[in-house]
Amino acid sequence: MSLRPICHIQYGGSADVSPQRKNMPTRCLLVNTYVRRSAFIDGGSKLFPRCTLLNNIYLNNGGVDLFAMIAVAMSVTCPGLYCGRIMFNGSVERDCGVCPRGERANLQKVCERCTEFPELYDWLYLGFMAILPLVLHWFFIEWYSGKKSSSALMQHITALLECSVSAMVTLLVTEPIGMLSINSCRVQMLSDWYTMLYNPSPDYINTLHCTQEAVYPLYTIVLIYYAFCLVLMMLLRPLLVKKIACGLGKSDRFKSIYAALYFFPILTVLQAVGGGLLYYAFPYIILVLSLVTLAVYMSATEIQSFKNLAAKKKRLVVLFSHWLLHAYGIISISRLDKLEQDLPLLALVPGPAMFYIATAKFTEPSRILSEGSNGH
């Protein structure tokens, strides 16, 4: 009985394993490669498991020791989706574990530095999370400022300044430090946001903890931004409100700040728990919420014609703000992959407002009640 080598496969390649091939080296090197074997085991075609290094595996009587191959593969490959080996001084450590912050395990299960530039969709997501506190600031400032107060405009400008400065500082302190840009790891699937749920247990007893920020820095950069927003608000807004909000009572002038102390923790928990869901759903959330809030505003202010709409500048500002949100949602959904097909969709932005004004007179409650009383 003679033993013959099975194969000789270069890095990254694939080959048919054939028992007839002779005079080949006795070492097979397989890196992230599936090896197709044919011509044996009932003439079928199967795939060997992914492995890193197979040494001196021989064919014996036309068969192959699959269990030996699987055992070797399991011994050299890190378990789980996000476990990897750390590069240290040009060499790879033997033990598998969590990758450092700013790194992610590649296909070879080696921790690799995140150096890619974010895609347009990633920037749109970060913009959405940055807009949320600003919109909430403006809403509560308008809600608590009162009709006779002249401080609302200054508070709106201050809130915009706070969020803008916070966004710039957040970008400056994120890798690469000192630049208004970021390096990131691309989002590949929803589980990238929840790596804590994918810690493997190779022996079903001990857990190998590989929790990390696989979507670096899309997860933590939002939390850092919220922290800067809160700090700047506490430094600037109380002094401004105390000086210019003279038309309000002492208990009312700080209510917009108190509201922010409530919604910032809510936004933080929302990002920490539902960041991955928001990443995929935010374009549709923008469209739905902007449509609903525009309809509620136009109904509350009794806008039923273009004349009523143009009667006050404030109404036009609210209308154009909602149109910007509509456009933002459409761009986020389309991602502008094909400009010639996606840009015409922006013509739909004024549609909801025009439809509301055109049909408002048919849904007037007094008209419906009067027609009901007349028997129509």
Image: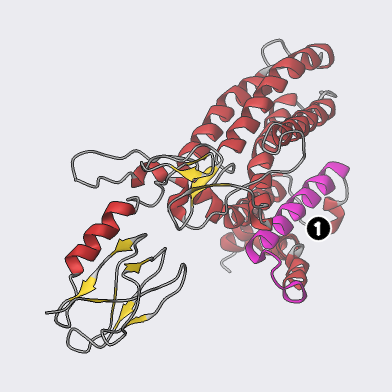
Q: Quadrant of residue 227?
A: top right
Residue at 73%, 76% in the rendered image: 341
Vertical side of 346 occupied by 96: above or below: above
Of helix, strand and loop, which mostly describes the magenta segment? helix
Residue nearer the viewer, 79 or 95: 95
Q: Is residue 47 above or below residue 134?
A: below
Crowding near pointer 1: few (<14 within 10 Å), some, many (20+)?
some
Q: Is residue 129 above or below residue 355?
A: above
Q: Residue furthest left?
A: 1
Residue 154, position as x, y percentages in the image: 84, 26
Examine the structure image and report whether residue 215 is included in the region drawn in magenta: no
* Left or right of 366, for residue 20: left
- Identity of the residue drawn at 33% across and 44% down: 199
Residue 224 can be seen in this image: yes
Residue extent of the magenta highlight: 312-341
Write down the residue under mark 1. Answer: 305
What's the colour scheme?
Answer: secondary structure
Residue 3 in percent (x, y) is at: 19, 76
